[in-house]
Amino acid sequence: LKVTLGGEITVYEPRGNYQLRVTTVELEGVGALQAAFERLKARLQVEGLFEASRKRPIPTFPRRIGLVTSPTGAAIRDVLHVVERRYAGLEFILVPVRVQGEGAGSQIAGAIIALNEWAEANPGALDLILITRGGGSLEDLWAFNEEVVARAIAGSAVPVVSAVGHEIDFTIADFVADLRAATPSAAAEIITAGYVLAAGRLLESTRRLHWMFGRTFEDLQTRTEALLSRLSRMHPRRHLEARAQRLDDLSLALGRGARRRLREAQVTVGSTSRRLADRRPAVLLALNRRELGDVGRRLARAGRRQWDQYGLRLERAQRALGLLSPLNV
């Protein structure tokens, strides 16, 4: 490798030896490129090409996009793959260019200018320009650090998105562009974000609309059924049927009441007849005779009991008197 060493020369005085004390090591060419990058960046920044106030908003729903990249690189495959997955209706106009090496910067700038001229000739035909390539070293990405590319981006009437390299890579084109994307895939996601969001909202609105229609239909069906039910209840035939049913119920109730009253009257007559039969003189006389016989028999039994009790008392008194007689002392 060819390297550029930075440091200081020192002398070892006892022996008079010279030595190089190295403090920095850079690959040859990288330091010069980085210095050129910083100089151009500072100059363009002073001119105001990086100011946020001059950057234009990216269209939310772009229809046609100018794509400035290599037709054989990985970047175009990443972009088209993401776009096809998220919103396949997006149209691209590819302007194939070299993305590294001698003359690549001029081709990129020429492609941007050509797309602007076509957009000017066809108003509203181009919504956005995307310049992109995959990652690489500083030398590989140098075409996007050239001033001619920065001037073309700054002078573009169409908004420009820059997606060069990986997330850690920054180029002059990134600073001048209206929007910088970390990777080509990220650029495709940003470009299609409006469509994805709108599709999500549309899906949610569709679900809500279906729900509202279903709810409204259910409400109308319920109201219709209620009205039909009320109409059925209020129909004259329904009233006649209800009155006829009421008449039938009253007729049945009247029949049941008459039969019940008849049974009650029969029970009352039977009970009264039995009571009258029990009160006839012959029955009462026979009853009195039975009672008189019972009383006579009870009186006889009571007399005999009383006579027996008196006999026992007399016998006890005689025994007690015999015990107290002087003849027995």
Image (tube, rainbow, N blue to C red):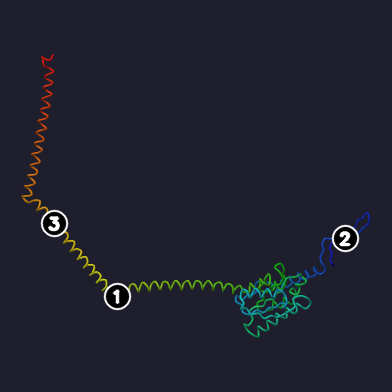
Give the Cα distance between marks 1 and 3.
Answer: 52 Å
Tell me residue 54's x, y (percent): 66, 74
Residue on which disc 1 sits: 235
Q: Amino acid at mark 3?
A: Gly
Neighbours of disc 1 within 10 Å: few (<14), some (14-19), many (20+): few
Looking at the image, residue 221 sits to the left or right of residue 97; the answer is: left
Observer-nearest of 61 and 24: 61
Q: Nearer the viewer's eye, disc 3 or disc 2? A: 3
| Residue 28 picture quarter | bottom right
Looking at the image, residue 105 sits to the left or right of residue 326; the answer is: right
Mark 2 or mark 1, earlier in chain: 2
Question: Do the numbered discs 2 and 1 sit on residues whose CB atoms are within 8 Å?
Answer: no
* SS at badge 3: helix
| Residue 176 picture quarter | bottom right
Q: Which mark is residue 270?
A: 3
Mark 1 or mark 3, earlier in chain: 1
Neighbours of disc 2 within 10 Å: few (<14), some (14-19), many (20+): few
Q: Amino acid at mark 1?
A: His
| Residue 141 picture quarter | bottom right
Image quarter (top left, top right, bottom left or bottom right) of the C terminus: top left
